[in-house]
Image: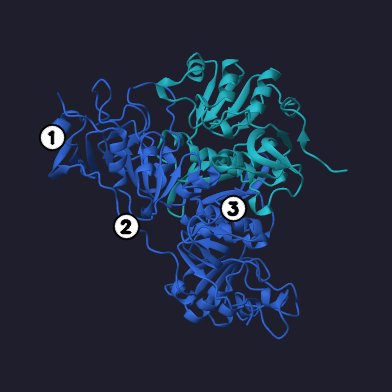
Chain colours: A cyan, B blue
Amino acid sequence: MTFSKLYDTPATAVADIHDGATLLIGGATRNSEPTALLVALLASGVRDLTCVCDFADWDGSEGVLQLAHAERIASIISPFPFAGESGGVIRKQWQAGALAVEVIPQGTLAERLRAAGAGIGGVFTPVVLGTRFADGRETRTVNGVECVLESPLRADFALIRADRADALGNLAYQGAQRGWNAVMAPAARITIAEVDVVGEPGAIDPELVITPGIYVNRVVHAPPTGEQG
Amino acid sequence: MPPAKLDPQAMARRAAGFIAPGDVVAVDSGLPSLVPGVTPPDLGAWFLRNNGMLNDLPLSLADAAAVTRGGYVDLAVVNAGQVDAAGSFSSLISTVHSGPNPPGNAVDLAAGSGRVIAMLPHADDQGRPNIVATLSSPADGLRCVSAIITDIAVIEVDSGGLTLAEVAPGWSGNDVRALTGADISISPALREMDFSPPTGVPPSKVYPDGPSAIADVPDGATVFIDGFGGPGGMAHYLLISLRDQGSRDLTIVSNTAGIARVVSFGTPPGRTAIDHSVLIENGQVAKAIASFPVSPSVSRPSEFELAYRRGEVDLELVPQGTLAERLRAGGAGIHAFYTPTGAGTLIAEGKESRNIDGRDYILEYGLRADFAIIRAHKADTNGNLVYRGTSRNFNAVMAPAARVTVVEVDEIVEAGQLDPEEIVTPGVFVQRIVKRPDAFTGYE
């Protein structure tokens, strides 16, 4: 018997995502976002979600935006929660007090996710020093450089998108897909990958595997529906 | 009628003029994202975008953050909302609003880059200046902008404030000053903006041989040496080159301190494996930072062990995963980090301990080196590397953490010949490339 991480449908793969869960949502463009998983999540009716993602309120990001329209998101953690004054539904909900927004610079978000995935308790880096992102934060001087303590950012689930997977959950990406998806995969308790192509174990050249299957709990085959971002 | 303002493409062409051959250029979204498209490919610039793409190489965002935080960015082009006279900027759009401004990656670019230039419209649609005495929202980058490119001018920023250096065609210094919301002096050498593309090619990274590639390793240098235990993934040719070069008092950082010779895996009869021992025998090593510093065989001590027993070398013992993490931190601009590895053991002695969310951690520090000598399978002429199998081991994590990374490869190919998806170490982390001579083996 071969153990398989393959799930038949996006709906079964996200069925245990519960109200109040913290989700890492990969991608920044349409073909790097786990669209089918987000559609299934919307259909599941789950609410009070905390969503960690790059561009939240952006035309290309149907998934997160639809969750926001349906008032399922309690909190957004993002470097780009909305674009200045032009923000739409997320900005409106934030202004109405219906949705919390935490802004984290992009590199800091990546480093905090990376720390979570690598079991690091916190990192000292000077990057945000002097900006509003250092307000109220623990600092210390390391090797003569004043640094801020950044803590790991862990999540209950990561919903990610890759180009192809094998049944063991080994993943390869294509181009900019790698960006957030590869950082988020190790940082969640349960990582669910939506992929265009699924192969047998060994189908992906080991030198090309970017995310080892040990970080991936579930794989859903969801070929693209045509439109590419 | 005022003269025409520049269109975004013209602003991008002017920004491209700031790029030197081979520069690593981090480009923000918005106006800066136009710069790569107007830069001549021959210039050999590396463009890092905020989706993690480094030219055509896909990076994870953690690796992209390491490029900026590790100090690899020569020039950052930020999409500013406002810039003040001290060179601080905010990334909000031009009109004032309350709330969480999206900083994107501007904070990283401001903090980690050699030089920061800001691109923005000189004034907003209502004619309100974007170059101001005081920012109307919190800064994303503090006193970091050295030049501002707008749709009517180029302004230089230094400790003395703003100096108008260039104007768009048809604009006078006083016209520009009238639209500027901060004190600005007009350079006596004020000139019209020049949109000609930058020229030049980056110096070659390919060195003719090992000795020339490591000739400037000084006495007292810290040197990363890749490899695991056996001969795989070890830069034997560069090790011999370093031995022959003779620099002394070296601190070597490596998984072992040279055990390939004593474990002898795969060594042909009558020959000896080349490993760190060649440096130790030659009296060049003062200290090793390693996770497997001793031989697995009591009866066959390594050269390092013998030297240690004689009191000739120091040793800092580091668990293997901590060594990898310290190297990663060193390359990614992380000065220290908490790890649970070693908490409560001998490894924790003398180190800060901390309980975080119910788990004990100890504080470990990033490791950086003057030189790394590493081994890969192939390089292209830009220094992009692919490894083969387990020979990847410490190579990939050492490359970003050294000031000068020298790689020994089996084959050097032209730029563009390696599959971007397969490249593990981007060339921005590799300064020198040496082809291992065909006849060279890992054995003496």
Pick out the residue farthest to the right.
A1
Question: Disc 1 or 2, which lies upstream in sequence?
Answer: 1
Vertical arrangement, residue B384 with respect to residue B54, above or below: below
Q: Amino acid at mark 2?
A: Gly
- Are the residues flagged by discs 1 and 2 in contact, CB closer than 8 Å? no
Depth check: give the residue in front, B29 or B222: B29
Q: For mark 3, what is the residue? A: B422
Q: For mark 1, what is the residue? A: B172
Question: Disc 3 or 1, which lies upstream in sequence?
Answer: 1
Residue B398 placement (x, y as % from top left): 55, 60
Q: For mark 2, what is the residue? A: B200
Q: Amino acid at mark 1?
A: Ser
Q: Secondary structure at mark 2?
A: loop
| Tags 3 and 2 both on a single chain | yes
**Looking at the figure, which quarter contains the N terminus of chain B?**
top left
Crowd class of label 3 (few under 14; some 14 to 19; many from 20; radius 10 Å): some
Would residue A154 be visible to someone looking at this image? Answer: yes
- Looking at the image, is mark 3 or mark 1 nearer the viewer? 3
Where is residue A193, by image quadrant? Answer: top right
Residue B126 placement (x, y as % from top left): 25, 20
Residue A78 placement (x, y as % from top left): 52, 30
Q: Secondary structure at mark 3?
A: loop
Where is residue B280, by image quadrant? Answer: bottom right
Crowd class of label 2 (few under 14; some 14 to 19; many from 20; radius 10 Å): few
Vertical arrangement, residue A129 with respect to residue A99, above or below: below
